Amino acid sequence: MALKTKINNLLKEVKAAWAICIKVWKDELSYPLSVLYFILAPILWLAPFIIFGFAIAGGRYSPVLEKMTGIGDIVTYTSLGFAFLGFASAALWGTGLSLRREQWIGTLESVLVSPVSRFTIIFGQGLHSITHTGSGLVLQLVVMIVVFGIHLNLWGIFPSLIAVALTILAIQGIGFMICSIVLAVKQGWMIIDVVDTVFWVVTSTAYPITILPAFLQVVARVSPITYGVESFRGFLLYGPWQPWIWQNIVILAVLDIIYLTLGYLIYLKSEERVKKKGTVHKF
Amino acid sequence: MKNETRFKYVLVDETPSLGVTMAIAWKSVKIALRYPFNILFWALVPIGWIMPAIFQGLALAGGTMSAEFASVAGTPDWLSYVILGSVLYMYVMSAVWGMGNALRWEQMSGTLESLLVSPVSRIDILMGAALAETVTTTLTATVQFVVLILIFGIPFAFPYILPFIVILTLMLLAFYGFAMAMAGIVMIFKDPDALTQFLDTLLYVLIPVRYPISKLPYAARILSLLIPATYALTAIRAIILLNKDIYAILDMIIILSVFTLFLWTFGYLAFAYAEYKTKKSGGTGKY
């Protein structure tokens, strides 16, 4: 009986998260220019890296990159990395700013006293980011295949979704930590921008992490996106049979547990503090 | 006919004053300096935005020189090329975002209406905002430039400082003409974030920040030639990286001067028209 109640409660939370996701989609679709920009932007962000790569290497192929990564095609290496990081980055912004958005429009207090878990609120916003940027990711991949003729291993498509899902979970954990800072200091975009910039620097999107200085390599090794992007690219290029990719997936799963637990605990502490100070509604 | 007369009235209602421009600029600089963390943020975080390009260059070329790059850019030193382009791009960003944001700030603070009915020229209002932007951007760009030079140990030389200043000033003037039109868009659409972000991203692709425009597809190259920053960045690199003197870049100076004249006329008319439309619809105070 207790189990049935728990399942029912969980289903209700999932329903609430979905309702939040739909609400944010409705908000977003009322600004068609923004939607258009966010569809085109990932391709425009990628373009300078591809063109710069061509200018430096004198063409699409770089022997130096191949020696370091096993992949000499600049377009394949960079576009897969970029598609994944763009997706992860948008999820980070979506989760990190979830409470701040409610603060801006003056509904945070109402949302926090509604009978749903606050993690459902954050997850609902994150779900919107995932569906939003997920469609961008698919679009980018289609453009890359059609325009640049990238060859993907079809057997790797399903396993690559495991990499995506596990990375999103870890980002939710990091997002909880950012939410706790946003609740306390309000100006969330700066914090997210700094964290996001660090991810863009240390993730192996257009270069392997071995090119980074030692201290940045340490940061890269504790970043879930590093393992996510390597697994994603590995599955899509080599299929699901490479043991090193599954090793990355295991590390990613361990990082998920660590980041989700830490994020959850830090968020609870921060919310308790903000409620005690009575500054939930201030912005 | 009635509308045309009123728009003409908006246009003749101008008596520019340097004192007012300076007062508006000083007010904006004072507000900016009240948020020192913001200045620190804008000085340091964009360095992180440059880093991926630098690491990518290292991963593809195996060093800071590339013979392939030399064949299209005139210099094998892609690192100096990218650093210079990226720091100068801060000025383009400030032109695209700054003046519009300054008006948006007035809108959000509820002071735009008071400002527009005060007996000052709108040229003063816009130039005051532009001047303040130039000061804060120069501050952040200098910090970035120094930090990048220290990190990568690049011995930049400024053998011809005067042409460098002339070109930078002309680029700023041309872009601030364009920024007036952006300010007009803010007046009408209030929060044109998507458009501004799109322009910012598109300009980054089109102008020679990381690579010469000869690497762009043909259609994009044509668009690039319609942007003043393309000429400014090319000329500044010619002075600093290729050691050219002012005579070698005279053609660029002439092109930038023509751009400045055109963009100021266009920008001013666009802003005046936006002001007229907003006042007519009674939406000046709305945000």
Image: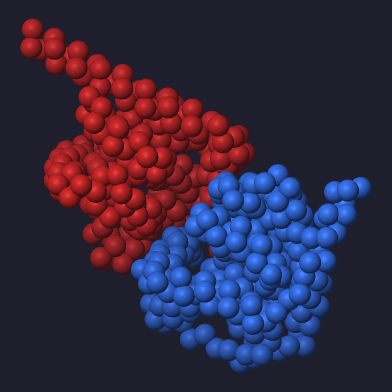
Give the residue displayed 36% in from the left and 62% down from the top.
A211
Looking at the image, the residue that sits furthest to the right is B1
Q: Position of residue B209 (x, y in %)?
A: 59, 65
Q: Report whether residue B60 is seen.
A: no
Residue A216 or residue A111, whichever sits in front: A111
The quadrant the N terminus of chain A occupies is: top left
Hey, which quadrant is residue A52 in on the image? bottom right
| Colour in which chain A is drawn | red
Looking at the image, the residue that sits furthest to the top is A1
Residue B148 or residue A17, whichever sits in front: A17
Residue B138 or residue B85, whichever sits in front: B138
Hey, which quadrant is residue B162 in on the image? bottom right
Residue A96, relative to residue B33: is it above or below? Answer: above
Q: Position of residue B210 (x, y in %)?
A: 57, 65
Q: How many marks?
A: 0
Is B204 displayed left or right of A226 in the figure? right
Q: Position of residue A100 (x, y in %)?
A: 35, 44
| Colour in which chain B is drawn | blue
Residue B12, relative to residue B160: is it above or below? Answer: above
Residue B45, relative to residue A6: is it above or below? Answer: below
| Display colour scheme | by chain
Give the residue displayed 48% in from the left and 78% down from the top.
B139
Give the residue displayed 44% in from the left and 81% down from the top.
B146
Looking at the image, the residue that sits furthest to the left is A2
Give the residue displayed 40% in from the left and 77% down from the top.
B147
Q: Report whether residue B61 is seen.
A: yes
Q: Position of residue A124 (x, y in %)?
A: 33, 30
